[in-house]
């Protein structure tokens, strides 16, 4: 939220950026319609609010139990020695664009190295984890293509 240059003055304008992460049961169109309704209601009362929705990426869904997920989980557990949970996440990914036109059963997953520094100023990854994932991806591609074909 940005509203002026000084704390002790009334700004001539204010801008708010809102990030709404939608789900299949409440998609982008519904979220935008709700926001437009709220803006319209306030404008009818004398406000001068505009709404500019951008980056409207569709929700990405993937089958939770697919050959790709099972193989990645198995390989990940073998390499890491830890249990790999299969969970849904709310995030923006290029998959929204790459999966357009694909059916709901198209094999997809978000799976990669990471830690608590993800998307922070000093984002980093452990070198060994990075190398382990290179090895995991190589094995995953060979096994998946061998079994899916």
Image (tube, grey):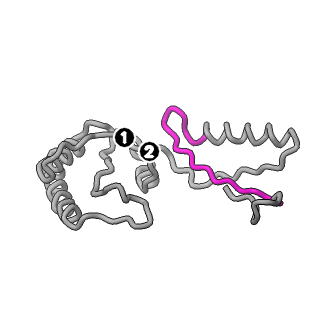
| Relative depth, front residue between 131 and 53 | 131
> Is 110 covered by the magenta stretch?
no
Q: Residue, x 76% and y 64% (percent of image)? A: 6
Q: Residue, x 82% and y 60% (percent of image)? A: 9
| Relative depth, front residue between 129 and 142 | 129
| Image position, residue 92 (x, y; %) | 46, 52
Q: Are marks 2 and 1 in contact (CB under 8 Å)?
A: yes
Q: Label 1, on which residue?
A: 88
The tag on residue 80 is none
Give, as a single range, the part of the protein colored magenta.
12-29
The tag on residue 90 is 2
Residue lying furthest top in this view?
25
Q: Secondary structure at mark 1?
A: loop
Residue lying furthest right in this view?
46
Instruction: Reply above or below: 30 against 149.
Output: above
| Image position, residue 61 (x, y; %) | 40, 41
What is the magenta segment's predominant secondary structure?
loop
């Amino acid at each position: 939220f940005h509203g002026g240059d000084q704390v002790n003055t009334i700004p001539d304008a204010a801008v708010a950026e809102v990030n709404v992460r939608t789900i299949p049961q409440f998609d982008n169109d519904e979220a935008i319609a709700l926001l437009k309704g709220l803006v319209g209601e306030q404008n009818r009362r004398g406000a001068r609010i505009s709404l500019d929705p951008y980056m409207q990426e569709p929700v990405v869904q993937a089958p939770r139990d697919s050959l790709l997920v099972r193989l990645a989980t198995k390989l990940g557990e073998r390499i890491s020695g830890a249990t790999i949970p299969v969970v849904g996440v709310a995030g923006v990914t290029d998959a929204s664009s790459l999966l357009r036109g694909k059916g709901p059963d198209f094999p997809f997953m978000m799976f990669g190295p990471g830690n608590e520094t993800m998307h922070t100023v000093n984002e980093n990854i452990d070198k060994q984890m990075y190398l382990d994932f290179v090895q995991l991806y190589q094995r995953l591609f060979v096994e998946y293509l061998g079994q899916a074909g």
